[in-house]
């Protein structure tokens, strides 16, 4: 598990429009809220993405961009975004490489079959590329507001 004070693992992933998004491109420019979620179009993941999208302008005023990552592919992300009117960037990590770097992959067993799943987790990364907040197994209800408080405090410091 990653902790505050550690350098954020760098990554490059495609977004819903298949454009590459690099964490490094935000270094020196913006703080980043990086949140991992299990699947597109599930009720809880939709609620979480909608809350972040609804408050995206507030995060932007604090010099912060929001990036969501799941193992779904770009086409699934595009359909999810368009169906629910989401404005935040959704990144595709089908092999789970970035998910593993951030320690958000869990192994579960369902009916005797082992499989991997993404643990809902959020990281706030500052302009220097340092993790300032790390939360694993988050409760998605009102999570965007909690993270906004973290971002606001980061802006003041």
Image: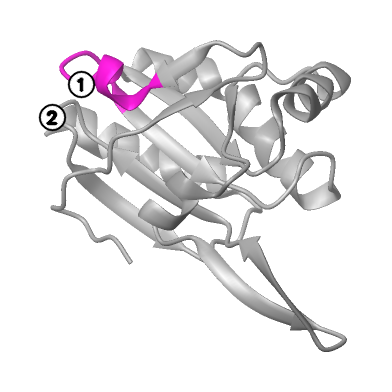
Q: Secondary structure at mark 2?
A: loop
Write down the residue under mark 1: 27
Lateral position of residue 129 relative to residue 67, left or right: left
Circle on res. 96: none
Residue beneath the point at 21% across and 33% down: 126
Write down the residue under mark 2: 128
Residue beneath the point at 84% across and 22% down: 79
Lateral position of residue 49 relative to residue 145, left or right: right
In percent of width and height, residue 115 lies at 71, 71
In percent of width and height, residue 125 lies at 27, 37
Q: Are marks 2 and 1 in contact (CB under 8 Å)?
A: yes
Sequence-earlier tag: 2 or 1: 1
Q: Which residues are magenta?
A: 22-31
Tell me how far mark 2 sits from mark 1, CA to CA.
6 Å
Measured along the vertical axis of the image, is residue 67 above or below residue 139? above
Locate the N terminus by quadrant: bottom left
Quarter occupied by residue 47: top right
Looking at the picture, tell me which residue is in the foreground, 101 or 44. 101
Label tally: 2
């Amino acid at each position: 598990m990653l902790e505050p004070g550690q350098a954020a693992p760098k990554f490059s992933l495609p977004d819903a429009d298949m454009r590459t998004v690099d964490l490094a491109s935000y270094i020196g420019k913006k703080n980043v809220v990086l949140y991992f979620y299990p699947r597109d179009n599930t009720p809880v993941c939709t609620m979480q993405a909608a809350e972040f999208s609804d408050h995206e302008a507030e995060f932007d005023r604090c010099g912060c961009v929001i990036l969501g990552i799941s193992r779904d592919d770009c086409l699934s992300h595009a359909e999810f975004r368009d169906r629910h009117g989401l404005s935040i960037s959704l990144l595709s990590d089908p092999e789970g490489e970035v998910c593993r770097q951030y320690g958000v992959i869990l192994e579960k067993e369902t009916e005797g079959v082992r499989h991997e799943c993404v643990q809902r987790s959020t990281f706030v990364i500052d302009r220097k590329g340092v993790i300032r907040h790390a939360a694993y197994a988050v409760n998605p209800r009102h999570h965007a507001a909690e993270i906004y408080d973290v971002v606001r405090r980061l802006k003041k410091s």
